[in-house]
């Protein structure tokens, strides 16, 4: 990956990434995803490749971190 991107998260399955990807796109956060296609074609390859990697541009790390933390929070506001 480029030097101006930070690894923010890894995912075992493509489905774990889909909603988070939509949230990042909605907030216009610049990100890249690595190994998504190889893992979607061969789910057992996720171990060999270290999962699907979400890289976020360094200028968006703080905003992305908040979205990821809110997304993973077990408590949801009603």
Image (spheres, helix red, strand yellow):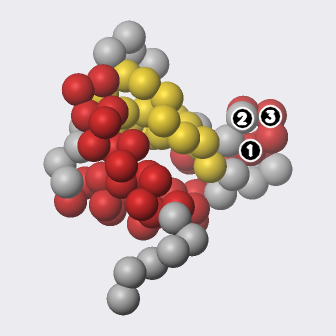
Question: For mark 2, what is the residue?
Answer: 50
Residue that lies at the very extreme toward the bottom in this rendered image: 78
Which residue is depicted at the point 19% across and 54% down? 27
* Quarter containing the C terminus: bottom left
Task: Give the CA distance from mark 2 to mark 1.
Answer: 6 Å
Vertical side of 5 occupied by 62: above or below: below
Is residue 1 rendered to the left or right of residue 66? Answer: right
* Quarter containing the N terminus: top left
| Viewer-proximal residue among 19 and 78 | 78
Question: For mark 3, what is the residue?
Answer: 48
Question: For mark 1, what is the residue?
Answer: 46
| Viewer-proximal residue among 63 and 4 | 63
| Viewer-proximal residue among 74 and 56 | 74
Circles 2, 1 touching at the beta carbon (< 8 Å): yes
At mark 1, the secondary structure is helix
Which residue is depicted at the point 17% across and 48% down? 28
Rate crowding at label 1 as few (under 14), some (14 to 19) or many (20 or more) other CA atoms within 10 Å: some
Task: Give the CA distance from mark 3 to mark 2.
Answer: 6 Å
Rate crowding at label 3 as few (under 14), some (14 to 19) or many (20 or more) other CA atoms within 10 Å: few
Circles 3, 2 touching at the beta carbon (< 8 Å): yes
């Amino acid at each position: 990956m480029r030097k101006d991107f930070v690894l923010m998260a890894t995912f075992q399955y493509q489905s774990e990434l889909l909603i988070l990807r939509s949230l990042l796109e909605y907030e216009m956060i610049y990100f890249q995803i690595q190994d998504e296609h190889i893992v979607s074609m061969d789910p057992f390859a996720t171990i060999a490749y270290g999962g699907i990697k979400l890289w976020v541009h360094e200028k968006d790390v703080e905003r992305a971190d908040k979205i990821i933390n809110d997304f993973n929070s077990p408590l949801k506001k009603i």
